[in-house]
């Protein structure tokens, strides 16, 4: 008897119903834009009240899985990076991870992204990366604009892979990327450093344009290695009181 009590599902009922609705979406092969059954039908299927079903739908909507509109049935949502982006931005803002740790994760993801982009890129992808490099050069003295363009460059690399999951991941890292770019610029303030950052992006672009997965991977890794090294130097100088 004690064992049976230990295995009781003590989660709120609406959470259990939300899990059941998510399973129904999968089992029924629903696609983005498809309607869910009505609230009344969901109540009948789950054997619960309308209040519980509405709580379950609200939980799924909060997770970015469905869309709720007044007077309409809930709809399946397409991939939405904003939910994950908000969580990651809060994690960085509340010091649950550092910029250096974010760069470590990005290094692992984006080295693979660059390699796949070099294999799958189109002529339009290459032209877009070239345009972004040129815009970054013009925005070199405008940190906020530069950070946004830096993010767009890395997103464009992800999109060039042809794999929407890479684009989703990089898109969710938008504010994290912009914060890390700003920190990197502060840690590398001299003109030579800024020129190197621009050169890194050109090198990544050229490797992808040439279709060299190996060169693209190495260029992306070198880019993150230099940024990490600069952050470490900057952190060390702040601790010792030395000027970077």
Image: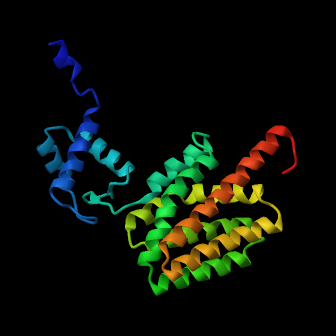
Q: In the displayed structure, does residue 154 sit left or right of residue 160?
A: right
Q: Residue furthest front?
A: 214
Position of residue 169 relative to residue 22, above or below, is below
Say whether residue 171 is visible: no
- Which residue is pictured at 29% across the width and 32% down the height? 12
- Which residue is pictured at 54% across the width and 81% down the height? 128
Residue 207: image x %, image y %? 55, 77
Position of residue 95 relative to residue 7, above or below, is below
Say whether residue 124 is visible: yes
Residue 45: image x %, image y %? 12, 45
Position of residue 180 relative to residue 87, above or below, is below
- Which residue is pictured at 76% across the width and 56% down the height? 186
Q: In the displayed structure, does residue 242 sit left or right of residue 113?
A: right
Residue 145: image x %, image y %? 68, 69
- Which residue is pictured at 71% across the width and 57% down the height? 184
- Figure disc tally: 0
Position of residue 240 relative to residue 130, above or below, is above
Q: Quadrant of residue 194?
A: bottom right
- Judge by depth and name the residue closer to the eye, 192 or 72: 192
- Judge by depth and name the residue closer to the eye, 220 or 63: 220
Colour scheme shown: rainbow
Q: Quadrant of residue 64?
A: bottom left
Residue 147: image x %, image y %? 66, 65
Q: In the displayed structure, does residue 192 sit left or right of residue 219?
A: right
Q: Quadrant of the N terminus?
A: top left
């Amino acid at each position: 008897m004690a064992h049976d009590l230990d295995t009781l599902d003590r989660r709120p009922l609406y959470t259990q119903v939300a899990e059941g609705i998510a399973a129904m979406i999968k089992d029924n092969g629903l696609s983005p834009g498809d309607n869910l059954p009505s609230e009344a039908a969901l109540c009948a299927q789950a054997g619960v009240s309308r209040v519980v079903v509405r709580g379950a739908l609200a939980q799924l909507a909060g997770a970015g899985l469905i869309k709720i509109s007044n007077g309409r049935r809930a709809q399946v949502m397409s991939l939405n990076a904003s939910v994950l982006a908000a969580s990651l931005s809060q994690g960085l803002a509340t010091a649950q991870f550092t910029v250096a740790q974010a760069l470590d994760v990005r290094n692992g993801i984006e080295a693979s992204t660059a390699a796949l982009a070099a294999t799958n890129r189109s002529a339009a992808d290459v032209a877009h990366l070239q345009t972004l490099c040129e815009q970054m050069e013009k925005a070199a003295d405008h940190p906020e604009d530069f950070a946004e363009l830096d993010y767009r460059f890395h997103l464009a690399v992800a999109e060039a892979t042809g794999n929407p999951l890479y684009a989703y991941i990089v898109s969710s890292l938008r504010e994290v990327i912009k914060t890390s770019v700003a920190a990197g610029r502060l840690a590398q303030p001299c003109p030579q450093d800024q020129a190197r950052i621009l050169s890194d992006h050109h090198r990544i672009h050229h490797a992808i344009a040439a279709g060299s997965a190996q060169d693209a991977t190495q260029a992306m890794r070198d880019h993150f290695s230099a940024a990490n090294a600069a952050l470490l130097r900057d952190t060390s100088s702040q601790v010792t009181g030395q000027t970077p």
